[in-house]
Amino acid sequence: MDERWIDEALEKTLDKIRTNVDAVGFRYPHVSLGGRYNDQGPEFWTSGFWPGILWLYHTATGDDAAKMLAIRLEEGMDRVLDGFVTIHHDVGFMWLPTSVAHYLSDGDGTARVRGLKAASHLAGRFNPAGRFIRAWNDKVQANSQGWAIIDCMMNLPLLYWASRETGDPRFRHVATAHSDTVLSSFRRGDGSFPHIVSFDPETGVKICNIGGQGYGPNSAWARGQAWALYGFAIGYRETGDVRYLEASKDASHFFISHLPERKVPVWDFRAPEGKRDAEDSSAAACAASGLIELSRLLPDGPDKEFYRSQGVAILKGLYDYYADWSGDQQAVILHGTVHYPAGRNIDVPIIYADYFFLEALLKLKGMKGLF
């Protein structure tokens, strides 16, 4: 495949972010409505993605205005971090691309402490009986004390970082214990994963799968499959455990084999015919970055090239059919789906689609991602 388009896609994306530094500014976006990113507030789980985009952009361009805005947004999240009661499992999504990215960029000590606080919150959600990290809180999801979700695989890099940073293996032990539970209780023989698994919070025994944002307990929510393939690639990168490598490969093959010609999946791979009217570009963007990450972990050879080429093909589909360069839209990537069963934010741009699209493009230019 001719890859000259990659430079063009990256240049256009960076140009749009340059404009958005002022246009989006001090907001914590989730979705774009009417061409303008909303402000979901610092408590929401997506609050780290716009600052994360700014850190990626700063690394690529050296733009200090983006760095200063990212730091202001990070500081604006302090009341959430220190308020504690609204903290949930997605602290990795929130403080890895903000505080940890900040610390790794310039060694800021306050940012380091924020990252370690967030990692301690995440580790504190570990249920030793079931060996899983609890999802959500009762205020968000009642009676969810025994729930774990596939998304949390993408929060574990925060724990791996904290373990390296402090020299304390406890954080890594929590991450690997949760990953092992996902292997034993989520993973299906075909490489797919449910969104939610419910455990008895007292005994740790698995009760059932729950559909969550997917169509049902036995379905394959597209973004969940992307979280799995990327999360297990990270697990392999951090531990060298070949079981995680095989899980990432299996999830990748399931995802790839169910893609349509334009490379962006329907919101749930197993949705019935009458419910296949929405795509999820965010799942495609996340999967593309995960596939490129997986490729980078493999020795030279056919496997390495296969996963890279598949990630590039998904990015090309996004660039050709889902990207907006009109100037009328703050988002880069269109046609995402947040929660189809709830009828919430269907066919809208989503901030993490933009994040993973940019991250994947920069990986192809030799940069590291933030996860």
Image (spheres, helix red, strand yellow):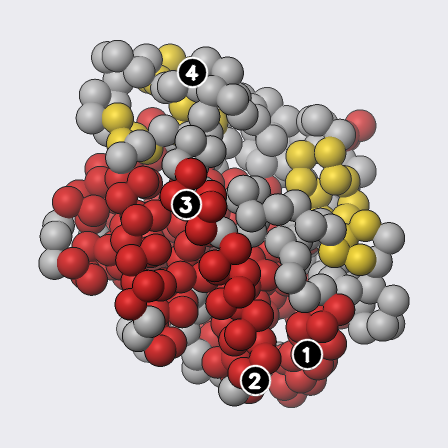
- The structure residue drawn at horizontal position 46% and vertical position 33%, both measured from the top left corner, is 86
64 sits to left or right of 147? right
Q: Which callout, 4 or 3, points to the residue nearer the camera?
A: 3
Chain-order first, disc 4 or disc 3 = 3
Q: Which callout, 4 or 2, points to the residue nearer the camera?
A: 2
Inter-mark Cα distance, 3 to 1:
29 Å
Q: Position of residue 60 (x, y in %)?
A: 52, 83
Image mark for residue 63? 2
Residue in the foreground of this view, choosing between 176 and 146: 146
Q: Is there a contact, CB below 8 Å, between mark 4 and mark 1?
A: no
Residue in the foreground of this view, choosing between 212 and 70: 70
| 126 up-or-down from 267: above or below | above
Q: Is there a contact, CB below 8 Å, between mark 2 and mark 1?
A: yes
Chain-order first, disc 4 or disc 1 = 1
Q: Badge 4, how many Cα within 10 Å: few under 14, some, many 20+?
A: some
Q: Position of residue 199 (x, y in %)?
A: 35, 17
Name the secondary structure under disc 4: strand
Image mark for residue 81? 3
Q: Position of residue 158 (x, y in %)?
A: 33, 53
Inter-mark Cα distance, 4 to 1:
46 Å
Check disc 4 and report the residue beneath it. 208
